[in-house]
Amino acid sequence: MLRRQDELIGALTDIATHDSASDELHRSIQALAGARWELARNRPETLDLLGVFLPSNNILYSYTLMCLIPALYCRRIEIRPSSRVKGVIETVHEILAPVVRERGRGQLALTRASQRDFVRSCGEADGVIFTGRYENGLEIASRVSSRTRLLLFGSGPNPFVVGPEASADAAVHDLLRSRLYNSGQDCLCPDAMFVHRDRLSEVVTHLGERLAEIPIADRRDPEARVTPLVYDDAVQGAAAFLDRHRDLVRFGGTVDVAARTVAPSIVVADLHPGLRPPEFFSPVFLVCAYDDAAQITQWATAPEELARGMYMSVYGEPELQSPVIGTSIVCRDCTTFDIEDGNRPFGGYGAHASSVHEHGRLAARPLLVSAEFGTGRPGRALATAGTTAARESA
């Protein structure tokens, strides 16, 4: 990776900002450096076949965690790239797969098969890794063997809480880092910000001042933070959301669908139990005012949020002391990106965010591939799908 980093970053910046591509590279190297200790800790079984659905973002890092490290204990890994970014994945594979082969590790095979044919070829695999919509993952789980262990990596809203005792400077700095990672195109980006009403004006003003300094730039510029988006549906979704809530827009709010640009935008509303933040995949800041931390707990324990609980960043809110709120793991005074570790389990306790499916049952929990196939595998009994299972796991 280090020797060919220019080629890798050149490929990644077709769909990612230079900054996030560089971050992916360094996170991938760090994960490879820790792989020896990860495998010693989890002692994964030798697998004959692992099927992998690669996502359409974080390509190098996903390839590292789902293909390169598993190649140390899998005889064959069949990889289906997302059709949206097939060319980028093919380039990454062409650079890295031969190194794995030369060192006598597992065989990495990139397929161009349709999803239906790929599922059929992996129907008797030891395991399948799926990244994407939960409903699609369930459909795949119904088509593979009951003995096949399906690991489903999804997403969640990852709310960012700014409490009454938070430093506005520190909170806004970290909020910008996390919301604007790859111009907002990452499942770890926070899709909602819950700000105590006493701090709302200060935080929104400070956030707007900082956003006003950020231009829309070319994604290959190492200094770029906001760039044209990659996916048409993300642009269209942001445009529809901003149009629908035009009276709540405090900053930005402009979208150029043809140029795929979404201006950094702040939408301010009140937090209410029925709020269901979409996955924006764009630089939209949905700021929700709250008066009491109990409102956050009430929101997080609604059935819909229990199902997709992943992470929650909490700054300066003394009433939120639990390590898990609803089914979301708390990141105390730090972002989701700060705690992400490629050699440790990823995700929360919401079934839509991260779950294991096997024998028609599921367990919702943070996932690490080697741990799920390890002799020291998490000992929780697989539970029937539903929010009750998620709450019990939490």
Image (cartoon, rainbow, N blue to C red):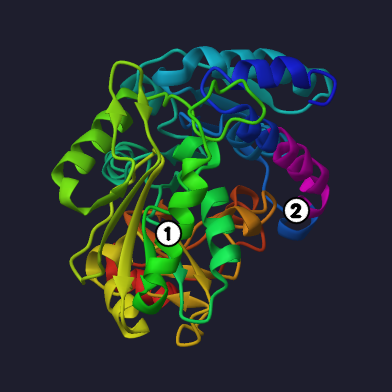
Principal SS element in the magenta part? helix
**Residue 364 visible here:** no
Mark earlier in primary sequence (2, 1) = 2
Q: Which mark is residue 38?
A: 2
Distance (Cα) linking label 2 and label 1: 44 Å
**Residue 371 visible here:** yes
Amino acid under label 2? Glu
Taking 112 as reference, is 285 above or below it? Answer: below
Q: Is 38 covered by the magenta stretch?
A: yes
Residue bearing mark 1:
205
Q: Is 237 covered by the magenta stretch?
A: no
Residue 10 coordinates in the image, percent (x, y) = 66, 16
Callout 1: SS:
helix
Q: In the visual, does 130 lie left or right of 289? A: right
Question: Is 88 in front, or is 367?
Answer: 88
Q: How many marks?
A: 2
Residue at the (31%, 65%) spot, across then down: 288
Name the residue furthest bottom: 319
Quadrant in the picture for residue 246: top left
Residue at the (24%, 34%) spot, across then down: 239
Residue 393 coordinates in the image, percent (x, y) = 43, 73
Taking 17 as reference, is 42 above or below it? Answer: below
Residue at the (75%, 17%) spot, across then down: 6
Q: Which residues are magenta?
A: 25-39
Quadrant in the picture for residue 124: top left
Amino acid under label 1? Thr
Taking 128 as reference, is 336 above or below it? Answer: below
